[in-house]
Image: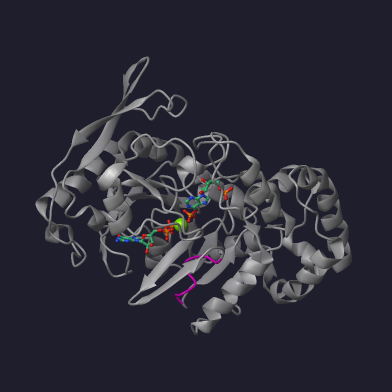
Amino acid sequence: MTAIVIVGAQWGDEGKGKVVDLYTESADLVVRYAGGPNAGHTLVVGNEKLIVRLIPSGILRSNARCVMAQGMVVDPGVLVSEIDAVEARGCSTEGRLFVSDRAHLILPFHPLIDTLREAAAADGVRLGTTKRGIGPCYEDKASRRGARLGDLRDMKRLAALVARSLEAWTPTLRALGGEPPALDAILDELAPLAKRITPMLADTSQLIDGALRRGERVLLEGAQGTLLDIDHGTFPFVTSSSAIAGGACVGAGVGPTRIRRVLGLAKAYCTRVGEGPFPTELGGPLGERLRTVGGEFGSVTGRPRRTGWLDLPALRYAARVNGLDGIALTKLDVLTGMPELKVCVAYDTPSGRTREFPIDELATAKPVLEPVAEWSEPLDAARSMSELPAAARQYVEMVEKETGVPVDVVSVGADRDATIVRRNAFA
Ligand code: GDP
Ligand code: IMO
Ligand code: MG
């Protein structure tokens, strides 16, 4: 019985897609447990690139089955087009992709509300969401209304649930200058999607439990990242779901006693897309260089990602709230040739210097930056630590020492092969 969790330890986009794909080689079941099409997980095999938003990143490996669990919010149109894109690559989803009938349905007016709210919000209040309707859909869930994927089995029941949600949102839509869509039009849009999706619906908690009882290896794939978590992130600049490792238990219906290991994903530097505090953010040519060399543009929205130095207190915080057993350090290759390299080791706050991440004082806290040795050699051909230049090796060792968490994996390029595996989380 082995379930492991792979979770973003920063502000998302840490390279979860790549590392999940890598570990799927030894997994039987890969489960997405939170978020929705706000996620964009990139898989690179040779010259081919695929970005999945809802389907688990294990989909390219035919040995594994994939599950979308009930903690997710699912846009049915996005799901169907994603299935078509995966199938068009010759990768079959039939009998391999299962979707929880309890996951919540993103309705067509959810993205509309998200978009209008973002447009109306003043500077300093705007969240910089992906406008995919994530917030309004989870708001429906927390309000105990809205529809779930299982409701697609019964169009009459679905009509009543959609009508109730639409009625509740109509004043908001009007106040934002929007026009509520007609109920019939929504149902006409949903009917053909329902036909495609209902054959995949399952009690996914039971499916995962069965796999664990048979001794199969289950990989729980996080979306977003620790600092975007609704409870533990930089509130209010967060997403609406539980992005931390504990969210895997809630979102997938797996008991905490079943989790064997938690692997945290961290870039060798930091990025953030959307609004909110980012203390180690770099402006100027160094930040621009990280963005260009790292290809730091949102996989969902194409927005340029904000870039900055590695934040070690934030990583220690992520180690704590996720209970990290290991770290996968990604994009180390992007730091090659940086004219200077710094990391944040502590914060100066009005109450003194701290090694903790001062999550409630980020407006006034100043990061304490320390220089570290640079290197100029390309790293993408390295397959073991001994093949890294000494300064890059020291960088990895510094992360281990500062966080107290072993670095299991070092990623040195976007391709699945460009990886140094020091420990397989399933071993
Ligand atoms: P996710 O949301 O955590 O899955 O990450 P994204 O896919 O949104 O963003 C990560 C980006 O970095 C993608 O374009 C990946 O192809 C790329 N990537 C992942 N690991 C590496 C790496 O080690 N080096 C480089 N250069 N790119 C990487
Ligand atoms: P993956 O899984 C990076 C950010 C948005 C915004 C905030 C709220 O690819 O790492 P939302 O649309 O969720 O209401 O937006 O969260 N955000 C992400 N940033 N990676 C993601 O997913 C994200 N999902 C949401 O940019 O700041
Ligand atoms: Mg992403």
Residue 55 visible within the image? yes
Residue 26 visible within the image? no
Would you identify the image quadrant in which residue 31 lies? bottom right
Q: In the picture, which quadrant includes the C terminus? A: bottom left
Would you identify the image quadrant in which residue 334 lies? bottom left
Q: Main secondary structure of the magenta part?
A: loop
Vertically, is 340 above or below 54? above
Residue 271 appears at what percent x and percent y?
A: 38, 47
Q: Is residue 43 left or right of residue 192?
A: left
Q: Residue furthest front?
A: 177
Q: Is residue 116 left or right of residue 162?
A: left
Residue 363 appears at what percent x and percent y?
A: 43, 26
- Give yes or no for residue 57 being in the magenta stretch: yes
Vertically, is 323 above or below 47? above
358, 252: nearer the viewer: 358
- Segment colored magenta: 55-61
Q: Residue at x 82, y 48 (%)?
A: 170
392, 166: nearer the viewer: 166
Q: Is residue 233 left or right of residue 182?
A: left
349, 1: nearer the viewer: 349
Q: Residue at x 62, y 45 (%)?
A: 118
Residue 336 appears at what percent x and percent y?
A: 19, 55
Q: Residue at x 66, y 68 (%)?
A: 77
